């Protein structure tokens, strides 16, 4: 008995001594040695303990370990790993700089850094490397980050030449696009042919198709998180390019060496400059261009404090002489303050401004002239915290409040001689607030769990005019009008948004993962066109429009192999409530009673995603395949039966490859295939009052022809010399190299014979935007 008691006491004392062992924290930043940029997602590992962590979105890490001596390895793909010997007997701040790898091709497979293990990659989340995106062929040679992410599984292009995208059956407006934490409401130039993101100014691109952390909310389908570069804090440098339709220039450098830096980046097309050379006077007076400008500065106040100020300004301008003018654009501004409390608590306080607006001018004559303006403005404040309790446990918490101002339309004459009168649609305001807590925990290296809860409240506020009518028959007159004074509450919505994601490691190279997201969306984009368009209208939830709600479930298997190979399979199911669709022949243009044009129902989407990727060697790239189905059921549409939505595409295939012949010469090839969009075409015709009219039997009764296209790109870099600061390269690309005539639209008209007389038959006419398009771009940096 005494022996057993003594043994028990010894075990208890041993446990107490182990638990009481001193622990200290190693923290700091991981940076690029050449330019001082913080590295996002760098790995910090202590192999002797089998523990580690990764840097956050600002390059910061924190690792709490028992007292002792350790060899700590810092690594990131594309950089040389470095080891640091650390005697941890107190809290230590250690900032580390990594060198980019400069190795010969034949050595790549031997010395290149190992990619992340299967368990380290979050479910339904993908990272696009900007350097790889720059190698891919692009329309008119203009590198486009949004077009690049459309080559990944589960992400579909909205249409030919369109920068809009759909994720796992979601609509365009169900994607939250953030640029340095500010919302970008219209991410396209030239009606969707190009995106607003200049790749030269971008550091990191992450897209979440599911498993979205509780920190983010407000959209049902995806989060596209884009981070701008901070700028070189060691020396002044620049880069740019001159292409067939646009040029760009980026300048960056230290404000105070290794303490502060700046970056400015501009891009502009010049199609309008060529129009001025035309012998046709009407063409010379036309205008067609876009520009965008990125700027960012940061300053290190102390070892624990740093501030960032960044902004984006972009605009499209289209004009036909002095008769017609159309312009639209975005503006964002972000002011952030990073602070480190001790060595375990990291905070980021952010002040955000975002604006999107458009304007249309019609000036036909002294009496026929008017302008239309519309837009949305956001002002927000965010507070995000991360507490690094230990290598197995990190707690994220914080909150956000955003003031939305919706300006649906202002119609007014340009001159006093106009026959038109001023008309202003009622504006609306909304306050969207949320708090969240998120916990990431690892159980014995095998099981990672991230669970969180976000609670969001949405208040629609006056000054506003609201209309009531009999919803069983929207064609009846308005029954009542309600006036709400400034800041008077019109309607409130609120609800919890639980999230959970689990990852179980079968071994170091294989992992099973699953996730569930419950999300709300309180603001909506109204558009009954097949593609994104600047005049699409953003409206808040309110008396007549309920928030959209989604539950998404995902299950995946991930496997990393030797020599940089990896593959994954994901299955998902998404259930959506309060989905918005439109009555037949809906009128969304400057409509004071636009809610009467809307119908509401449920939607669902499910599918499987396959990805095979090779990251190392002379040949790199991936093959992505998505098999999916997206349906909707709305009372009052299609005899109340389910129907396919316009972005339902059963099959999507992407093939992407880059082959490096030498360090200077590389060839890239992409090939895409997609089932045609679901569309509503006439199923018959009838005569009424002497006119032939189309009869539409049901929604989504046909499909567009299948879409496929191949692109090629050849990059030739100039010779590198040690003392030569100026470098250049040439990029030759061919868009749609086998000249496929893909359908942009199909319209119907009365067929006529060779003499121009109606035959009594209806014929379909296909419009194709782009066939084979070669381009050339000269890139440089110094």
Image: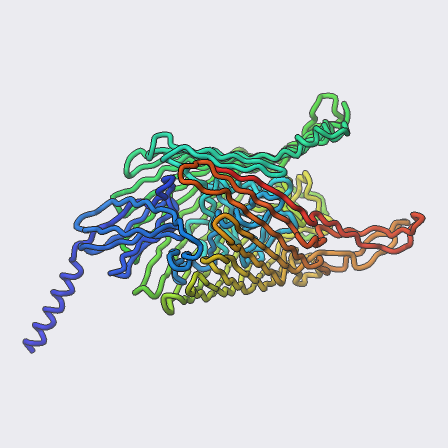
- Quick one: which residue is furthest to the left in this view? 2
Q: Is residue 355 visible?
A: yes
Q: Is residue 335 above or below residue 647?
A: above
Residue at 59% in and 63% down: 628
Quarter of image, res 680: bottom right
Percent of width and height locating residue 695: 80, 56
The image quarter in which residue 633 lies: bottom right
Left or right, 218 with reference to 500: right
Q: How is the image coloured?
A: rainbow
Q: Does the image show residue 468?
A: no
Horizontal and vertical percent position of residue 379: 47, 36
565 or 297: nearer the viewer: 565
- Quick one: 301 or 347, which is closer to the camera? 301
Q: How many marks?
A: 0
The N terminus is located in which quarter?
A: bottom left
397 to the left or right of 478: left
Location of residue 779 in the rendering, given as x and y in whole percent from the top left corner: 53, 39
**On screen, 473 above or below 370?**
below
* Residue farthest top in this picture: 416
Nearest to the observer: residue 413 or residue 672: 672
Q: Is residue 529 left or right of residue 337?
A: right
Q: Residue at x 55, y 36 (%)?
A: 330
Is residue 539 toward the left or the right of residue 690 in the image?
Answer: left
Q: Position of residue 527 (x, y in %)?
A: 65, 46
């Amino acid at each position: 008995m005494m022996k057993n008691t003594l043994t028990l006491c010894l075990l208890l004392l041993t446990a107490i001594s182990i638990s009481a062992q001193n622990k200290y924290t190693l923290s700091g930043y991981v940076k690029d040695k050449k330019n001082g940029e913080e590295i996002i997602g760098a790995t910090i590992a202590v192999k002797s303990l089998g523990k580690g962590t990764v840097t956050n979105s600002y390059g910061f890490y924190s690792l709490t370990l028992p007292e002792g001596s350790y060899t700590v390895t810092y690594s990131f793909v594309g950089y040389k790993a470095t080891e640091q010997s650390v005697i941890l007997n107190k809290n230590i701040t250690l900032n580390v700089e990594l060198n980019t790898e400069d190795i010969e091709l034949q050595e790549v497979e031997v010395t290149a850094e190992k990619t992340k293990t299967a368990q380290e990659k979050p479910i339904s989340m993908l990272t696009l490397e900007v350097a790889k995106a720059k190698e891919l062929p692009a329309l008119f040679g203009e590198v486009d980050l949004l077009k690049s992410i459309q080559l990944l599984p589960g992400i579909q292009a909205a249409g030919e030449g369109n920068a809009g995208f759909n994720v796992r059956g979601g609509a365009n407006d169900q994607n939250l696009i953030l640029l340095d934490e500010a919302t970008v409401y219209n991410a396209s130039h030239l009606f969707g042919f190009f995106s607003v993101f200049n790749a030269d100014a971008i550091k990191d691109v992450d897209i979440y198709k599911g498993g979205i952390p509780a920190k983010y909310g407000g959209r049902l389908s995806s989060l596209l998180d884009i981070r701008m570069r901070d700028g070189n804090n060691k020396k002044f440098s620049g880069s740019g390019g001159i292409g067939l339709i646009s040029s760009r220039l980026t300048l960056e450098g230290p404000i105070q060496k290794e303490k502060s830096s700046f970056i400015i980046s501009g891009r502009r097309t010049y199609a309008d400059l060529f129009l001025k050379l035309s012998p046709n006077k009407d063409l010379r007076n036309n205008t067609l261009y876009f520009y965008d400008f990125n700027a960012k500065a940061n300053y290190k106040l102390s070892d624990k404090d740093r501030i960032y100020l960044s902004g984006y300004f972009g605009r499209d301008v289209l004009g036909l002489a002095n008769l017609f003018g159309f312009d639209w654009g975005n503006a964002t501004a972000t002011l952030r303050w990073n602070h480190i409390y001790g060595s375990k608590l990291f905070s980021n306080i952010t002040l955000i401004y975002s604006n999107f607006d458009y304007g249309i001018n019609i000036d036909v004559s002294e009496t026929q002239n008017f302008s239309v303006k519309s837009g949305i403005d956001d002002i927000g404040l965010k507070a995000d915290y991360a507490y690094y309790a230990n290598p197995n446990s990190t707690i994220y918490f914080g909150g956000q409040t955003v003031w939305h101002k919706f300006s649906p339309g202002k119609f007014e004459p340009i001159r006093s001689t106009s026959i038109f009168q001023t008309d202003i649609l009622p504006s609306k305001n909304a306050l969207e607030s949320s708090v969240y807590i998120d916990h990431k925990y690892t159980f014995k290296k095998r099981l990672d769990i991230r669970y969180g809860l976000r609670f969001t409240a949405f208040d629609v506020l006056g000054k506003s005019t609201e209309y009531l009518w009999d919803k069983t028959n929207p064609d009846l007159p308005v029954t009542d009008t309600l006036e709400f004074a400034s800041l008077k509450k019109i309607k409130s919505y609120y609800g919890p948004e639980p999230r959970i994601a689990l990852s179980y490691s079968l071994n170091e190279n294989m992992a099973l993962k699953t996730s569930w997201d419950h999300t709300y969306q309180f603001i909506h984009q109204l558009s009954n066109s097949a593609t994104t368009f600047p005049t699409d209208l953003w409206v808040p939830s309110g008396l007549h429009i309920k928030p959209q709600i989604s539950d998404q479930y995902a299950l995946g298997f991930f496997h990393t192999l030797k020599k940089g190979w990896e593959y994954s399979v994901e299955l998902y199911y998404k259930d959506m409530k309060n989905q918005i669709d439109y009555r037949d022949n809906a009128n969304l243009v400057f409509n004071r009673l636009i809610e009467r044009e809307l119908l509401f129902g449920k939607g669902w989407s499910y599918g499987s995603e396959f990805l095979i990727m090779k990251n190392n060697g002379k040949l790199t790239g991936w093959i992505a395949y998505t098999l999916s189905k997206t349906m909707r059921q709305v009372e009052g549409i299609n005899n109340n039966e389910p129907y396919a939505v316009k972005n339902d595409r059963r099959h999507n295939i992407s093939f992407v490859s880059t082959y490096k012949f030498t360090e200077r010469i590389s060839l890239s090839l992409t090939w895409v295939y997609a089932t045609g969009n679901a569309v509503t075409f006439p199923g018959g015709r009838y005569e009424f009052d002497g006119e032939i009219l189309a009869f539409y039997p049901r929604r989504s009764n046909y499909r567009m022809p299948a879409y496929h296209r191949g692109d090629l790109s050849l990059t030739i870099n100039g010779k590198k010399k040690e003392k030569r600061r100026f470098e250049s390269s040439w990029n030759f690309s061919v868009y749609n190299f086998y000249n496929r005539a893909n359908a942009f639209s199909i319209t119907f008209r009365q067929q006529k014979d060779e003499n121009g007389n109606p035959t009594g038959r209806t014929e379909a006419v296909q419009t194709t935007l782009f066939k084979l398009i070669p381009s050339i771009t000269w890139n440089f940096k110094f």
